[in-house]
Amino acid sequence: MSVDKTIEELSQTLSQLSILVEHINGQIVGVTSRINITLDNFDNSVGGIAKDASALTGQVGDTVSQIPNSWVFYLLFITLIVVLILLSILIIINLVTKAHAIYRLCFPDAAESEANTPLPSNYSESRLLQRYDNSLQRFPKATRNDIAIPIEDARINTTSFPMDSSGINPSFHNNGFQTGRPNLGK
C-alpha cells in the first residue's frame, strides 16, 4: 500500500503545482496585458508624432516654395549658427586656459617652482648675461652724423623804470593798460 500512498501524494503535489502554475500564468497575463496597453499607447503617440512631423514637413515645404531663393536665407542662418558654436568653443577654450593659468599660479609644480623662482640662480643670471652680450654683438652701434648749430645768447634787457608815487610802473600808462590798484596819490 505504500506505493498507492506514494502515488496519491504525487498526484496531490502535481495538483498543487498545477494550481500554482495557473496562478503564475494569471499574474503573467495581467503584467503582459498592462505592458501591451503601455506599448499600444506609446505606438499611438509615435504615430501622432510622425503625423505631426509629416504635416510640419509639408508646411516647411510650402513656406520654402513661397519664398524665392530661400536657400540663401537658410544658408545664412546655418552659417550664423555654426559661427556662434565656434565662438562658444573659443570662449570655453579661453576660459579653460585662464583657469589653468590661475591654477598654475596657485599650485605650482616642484620642478616649475625651481625654474620660475624669483630668487637669483646661476643658470638664470648666466643666461641673461649671455643673451645681453649676444644682443650687443649682433647689433653694432651705428655711427651718428651730428650737426651742431651755434645758438645766440639770449638778450636780457635790464632797464628799470622809475616808479611813480602810487607804485605803478609808468610804462603801463603809456601802453594803455589799467591796473587794479586804486590811485591813492592823486
Image (cartoon, rainbow, N blue to C red):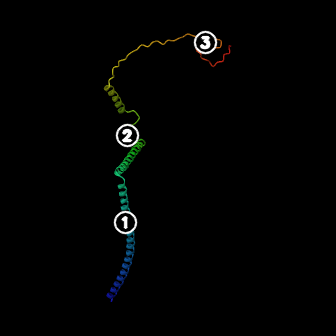
Image height check: is 119 above or below 6?
A: above
| Residue 143 in the image, given as x and y percentages of width and height | 33, 20
Question: What is the crowding at mark 3: few (fewer than 14 residues within 10 Å), some, or many (at least 20)?
Answer: few
> Which of the two discs, 2 and 3, labels the residue nearer the N terminus?
2
Which mark is drawn over residue 170? 3
Alpha carbon of mark 3 to alpha carbon of mark 1: how far? 112 Å
Identify which residue, 138 or 121, lies in the foreground. Answer: 138
Give the amino acid at mark 2: Glu
> Which of the two discs, 2 and 1, labels the residue nearer the N terminus?
1
Name the residue carrying label 1: 47
Identify which residue, 165 or 100, lies in the foreground. Answer: 165
Left or right of 154 on screen, residue 96: left
Q: Quadrant of the C terminus?
A: top right
- Kind of element beneath mark 1: helix
Image height check: is 14 above or below 124?
A: below
Image height check: is 184 above or below 134?
A: above
Give the amino acid at mark 3: Pro
Alpha carbon of mark 2 to alpha carbon of mark 3: how far? 80 Å
Question: What is the crowding at mark 2: few (fewer than 14 residues within 10 Å), some, or many (at least 20)?
Answer: few
Q: Quadrant of the N terminus?
A: bottom left
Image height check: is 135 above or below 83?
A: above
Specify the quadrant of the image occupied by residue 131. top left
Give the amino acid at mark 1: Gly
Question: What is the crowding at mark 1: few (fewer than 14 residues within 10 Å), some, or many (at least 20)?
Answer: few
Name the residue carrying label 2: 112
Contact, mark 2 vs mark 1 (Cβ under 8 Å): no
| Residue 85 in the image, given as x and y percentages of width and height | 38, 49
Identify which residue, 58 or 93, lies in the foreground. Answer: 58
- Kind of element beneath mark 2: helix
Alpha carbon of mark 2 to alpha carbon of mark 1: how far? 63 Å
